[in-house]
Image (tube, grey):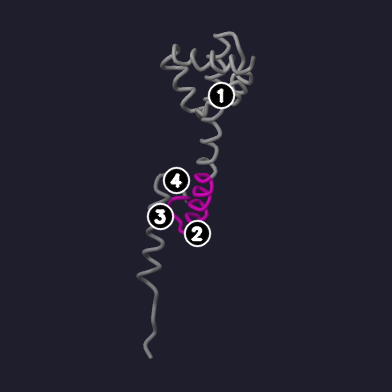
Amino acid sequence: MPRVTFAVPSRKRRKRALERAKGFYGASSKQIRTVYDAVDKANANAYIGRKLKKREYRGLWTIRINAACRSLGTTYSKFINGLKKAQINVNRKVLADVAVKDPEAFKVFVEKAMAALK
């Protein structure tokens, strides 16, 4: 029975890892054992980064809404509470966009939210 080598699949696997490590510093882009570690670490950090990005954007939207609310004489928490009581379901991303691009429309949201609190 002839001896079987796995040269083609292993070369393909190594080549794929080396492609992912292009641009890494020093041995992290050259030596295959180090490359595997570097690529695994990079993938883990990329996964974490995707989660952090969502968190950071929500914080940014909150800051923008709060700034717009304070310029109209209320606070973020009162505004959100008023929206819930008025049963206005608009997400924070849209609210932040309206607050920045169309202050008049945002003022209408604030007025309805404050009316619902009274």
* Side (left or right) of 49 relative to 12: right
- Alpha carbon separation for disc pair 3 and 1: 41 Å
Give how far apart the Cα atoms at labels 1 and 2 are: 44 Å
* Numbered disc 1: secondary structure: helix
Q: SS at mark 4? A: loop
Secondary structure, magenta segment, majority class:
helix
Residue 81, located in which quarter of the rendered image? top right
Q: CA distance from mark 2 to mark 4?
A: 14 Å
Q: Which residues are magenta?
A: 28-47
Q: Label 3, on which residue?
A: 18
Would you name the residue on which mark 1 appears?
62
Question: Which callout, 2 or 4, points at the residue further toward the start of the chain?
Answer: 4
Name the front one of labels 3 and 1. Answer: 1
Residue at the extreme bottom of the image, as rendered: 1
Please report the residue visible at 51 percent of the width from the left and 53 percent of the height from the top: 40
For the N terminus, the image quarter is bottom left
Amino acid carrying mark 2 in the image: Arg
Front position in the image: 118 or 41 = 118
Image disc number at residue 33: 2
